[in-house]
Image (cartoon, rainbow, N blue to C red):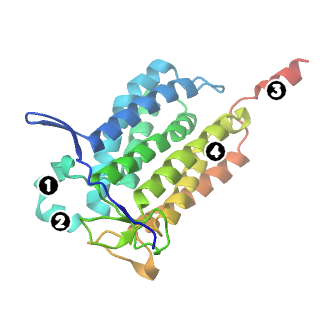
Amino acid sequence: MLPVLVFPQFDPVLVQLGPLAIRWYALAYIVALLIGWRLMRRLAEWTPRVATPLEVDDFLTWATLGVVIGGRLGYILFYQPSLYLSHPGAALALWHGGMSFHGGMLGVVVALLIYTRRHRIPTLGFADRLSVVVPIGLGLGRCANFINGELWGRPAPADLPWAMIYPQVDGVPRHPSELYEALLEGVLLLLVMVMLARSERIRARGGLLTGGFLLGYATLRAFAEHFRQPDAFLNYLAFGTTMGQLLCIPMAIAGIGLILWALRRPPLVATVAEEEAVSS
């Protein structure tokens, strides 16, 4: 019989300074925003140039508000509306967890639309660069979920070497689904997006990278949901699906639509190779 891993019961609080507590969950968001901001400063200047580093700097505040407000509202509306309607004050208790990526994404979309129109920045070009760095936040966020001992997986086969028992749940070996999602939605999706972004021809078609991200995330998240235990207050929905999988359907449709639209549109600018060919 194979030995079974036991969840190590991490302390969700990284540092406690009197009444001030710095949690791993908050740290994951902060680190993701900072790394994403630095990477996007470089991406925004790649041809075709869509924004200046200063404009990316200014957008960081907008993105932060979009993630926090949208993520919280999305969790409230998509997952537990009745609870927060009866206890509205609990909506402000972010330290108790409860953030939705789909809601956070919608919040960032709203922030991006307002910001790019106000500063006359090409919306799809800016969104393309932003979509490349989003998996950083996804991966770190899932690692924080694991540290918090939340969003655990479904029961795993007895011969799975990395099956893990979560003592706060039961004594059943389960899939460490938070780590699956960190690897899929974080590491794998980031590598794919960076690889695609390196192509000037792809960058020149506004919306193509954004569509690829939406479709890629929806596919990977829907797959990972097969290993994740559904939230107890929702359980399985129609046809054995989960809320996460249902929310991925409109994302996938939007991604496919953006990809097709971008491929049918002319490039934003000629690529370097095309310019050199014309000049020669």
Q: Tag 3 or tag 1, which sits nearer the N-term?
A: 1
Q: Which residue is mark 2?
A: 83
Foreground: disc 4 or disc 1: 1
Contact (CB < 8 A) between labels 1 and 3?
Answer: no
**At which x and y percent is residue 250?**
50, 62
**Res. 252 image quadrant:** bottom right
Q: Is residue 215 above or below residue 278?
A: below
Q: Which residue is drawn at the image coordinates 19% and 47% (left, top)?
A: 95
The picture quadrant where one finds residue 166 is bottom left
Q: Do the CB atoms of the residues marked 4 and 3 lie less than 8 Å apart?
A: no
- Judged from the image, the secondary structure of the residue bearing numbered disc 4 is helix
Camera-nearest residue between 148 and 84: 148
Q: Which residue is mark 3?
A: 273
Q: Pointer 1: what residue?
A: 90
Left or right: residue 162 versus residue 88 is: right
Residue 3 drawn at (x, y percent):
41, 66
- Within 10 Å of the Cα at label 1, are there few (<14), some (14-19), or many (20+) other Cα atoms? few
Q: Is residue 44 above or below residue 203?
A: above
